[in-house]
Amino acid sequence: MKRVLGIETSCDETAAAVVHGRHVESDVVHSQVSLHAPYGGVVPELASRDHLRNIRPVIEAALSRANCTLDAIDGIAVTCRPGLSGALLVGMQAAQGLAWAAQKPIVGVDHLIGHLLAVFLEYDTPGTHEPAFPFIGLLASGGHSALYKVSGPLATDIEELGATRDDAAGEAFDKVAKLLGLGYPGGPIIDKLAAQGDPDRVTLSKPMAQKSELEFSFSGLKTNVLRWVTKHGRPGDDQTLRDLCASFQRRVVDSLLDKALIAARDEGIGRIVIAGGVAANRELRTRGAERAAAQGLEFIIPPFRACTDNAAMIAYAGAMRLERGEDDAGRLEMSPHTLLPTVTRKGSGRRRTTPSAQSPG
Ligand code: KG4
Ligand code: ZN
């Protein structure tokens, strides 16, 4: 069982964690939300500069909260893809410096694999339920929304079944919140407002309702909200705003769940795991559990803190490679693209050729 230092800087969170086996010994996340909030989205240049300012104190805090030194670590895992190039490089440089100085193995981790394995993390209560492979992974974050067949913890065990053709689910939450003047990031704000709204009072069309393919599309729904606002005016802080948020959220949640349930049925797999920032959404968690139970499926929900970006999931995913004696020292490469072959192309749906014939990402 390895003790791993994880480092994550792919987007707007500077994070470091120490994970021993499945157990999270420390989990430090410095969020840049307030830095990017005035712009309504992440500004890459500002992100890199802020990572540079915070990477050292965040790593030091992770080690000290775990009561541990670099010597007591068996290896280092760092996110090397996908993400903002300048942001990724900050974490990778720090990780490589530490690995070299302490003479420890280092492995690069695909951020999406980190999200998909976050459900294995064990926080304060040891002995929490550990899902079994294979499972259908429903990953919905700010940058990605896709369904995966996850047969094991390595990249070669993970197969994309379909993804979004346009916006990611979290991106849709963020864009709709922006057009409603609600602030950034939109997901948690809409989640709160929707809880007090009626999803049936404002009619919005269901995304890709007629399609049984394992793909998502959220940009039409966003345009639907925009049209509603153009016609009726932007609602103030009133019940109409809550109803509009509830209607939008219900459409996103049901679209994600519809396709996840189809994937489970098609693949003959009895369990669904949710992952990524949108997996923190309360309606997705409760409605998902109800709908899956109605079909006799297991629905596995990671703790809130494991859903949004963190370094514990990176440490755990890296441990799976370190356990096999792998070491990327001297050949760690950054990429803005995921390592996982993709079957859905943004803007144009399913690829006609086999995924292996495509360029990476
Ligand atoms: O996984 P994550 O932290 O970062 C990426 O890898 O993108 O996901 C961030 C996204 C944001 O778009 C945010 O609005 C969304 O997750 N999000 C939520 C909730 N909490 C975060 N969306 C819906 N409901 C939430 N409670
Ligand atoms: Zn993420």
Image (spheres, rainbow, N blue to C red):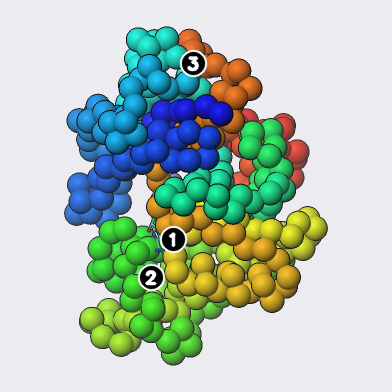
Between 347 and 103, the one lying in front of the other is 103
Q: Is residue 171 left or right of residue 56?
A: right
Q: Position of residue 75 (x, y in %)?
A: 47, 21
Q: Nearer the viewer, residue 199 or 21?
A: 21
The residue lying toward the viewer, choosing from 317 and 339, is 317
Q: Amino acid at mark 2?
A: Asp
- Callout 1: helix, strand or loop? helix
Where is residue 146 shown, x and y percent of the image?
Answer: 59, 52
In the rendered image, residue 182, in percent from the top left (x then y), is placed at 26, 68
Residue, disc 1: 280
Circle 2 sits on which residue?
191
The answer to whether mark 1 and mark 3 are in CB contact below 8 A is no
Q: Is mark 1 within 8 Å of ligand 1?
A: yes
Q: In the figure, 299 relative to 328: above or below?
A: below
Alpha-carbon distance for marks 1 and 3? 33 Å
Q: Quote the CA–CA distance across marks 2 and 1.
A: 9 Å
Residue located beneath label 3 in the image: 105
